[in-house]
Amino acid sequence: MRTLLEKLITKQADLDLCGAWGSGEEALAVLHALKPDVVVVDLELPGISGEDSIRALSAILPCAAFVVLTVHENAERVFGALQAGANGYLLKGSPSADIVSGIQAAHRGGSPLSPEIAGLVIRAFQNQTPKKAMIPLPSLSTRERQILELLATGMVPKEAAAELGISYETVRDYLKQIYQKLHVRSRTEAVLRFLEAGEG
């Protein structure tokens, strides 16, 4: 599957392949230097799990989008991955074109979901308990709040940097500070926490 995915990505004119690794540990050892925009993760990995890989990689790649590509479509695995910080969730049986478009969508700030997964998520929200009381955010600087507001609209960090007239590296540093203040480990969690507080 990894070999097929490598071939699929390298055929795309608008995608560059940084590399492909067989475990989360291998990816953790090198991705901090490569700084990819999108990381595709399988949930079934030797060593640390896909979910734990996403959590660990989110800490060193705060601006990256994480797309799960897996055979699992049960609610526990889906929501476990999303809570870990996944931005998208695709099934391995998806057509190649859908996988490519999912990676591209994640790069643009979207949240690609296979139709089966989208249906599962919708049903879960329809059956959820009444909304929890809003939890106020800890003190954020004006710039940190601006960045979160832009990310909550669907912008990716590079777009937020351009909008604010600051560098991508500066946005990345602000995101790390935001993670610490909100006690989260991914961009997805930070935006959800922002929206839960009624800020978005």
Image (cartoon, rainbow, N blue to C red):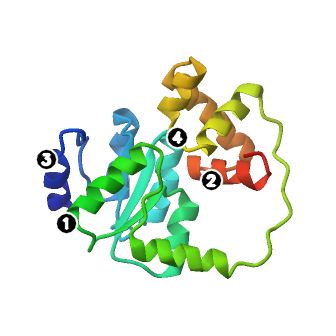
Residue at 55 percent across and 71 percent down: it is 79
What residue is shown with label 4? Answer: 62
In front of the other: 54 or 16: 16
What residue is shown with label 2? Answer: 189
**In this rendering, the label closer to the viewer, 4 or 3:** 3
Q: CA distance from mark 2 to mark 1?
A: 29 Å
Q: CA distance from mark 4 to mark 2?
A: 11 Å
Q: CA distance from mark 3 to mark 2?
A: 32 Å
What residue is shown with label 1? Answer: 1
Dot 2, crowdedness within 10 Å: few (<14), some or many (≥20)? many
**Reading the chain from its start, which is encountered first: label 3 or label 2?**
3
The spot of residue 134 in percent (x, y) is 84, 58
Q: Secondary structure at mark 2?
A: helix
Residue 168 in the image: above or below residue 87: above
**Residue type at the position of mark 3:** Lys
Q: Secondary structure at mark 4?
A: loop
Q: CA distance from mark 4 to mark 3?
A: 27 Å
Residue 51 in the image: above or below residue 65: below
Q: Which residue is outermost to the top? A: 165
What label does residue 11 carry, if any?
A: 3
Residue at 47 percent across and 56 percent down: it is 111
Dot 3, crowdedness within 10 Å: few (<14), some or many (≥20)? few
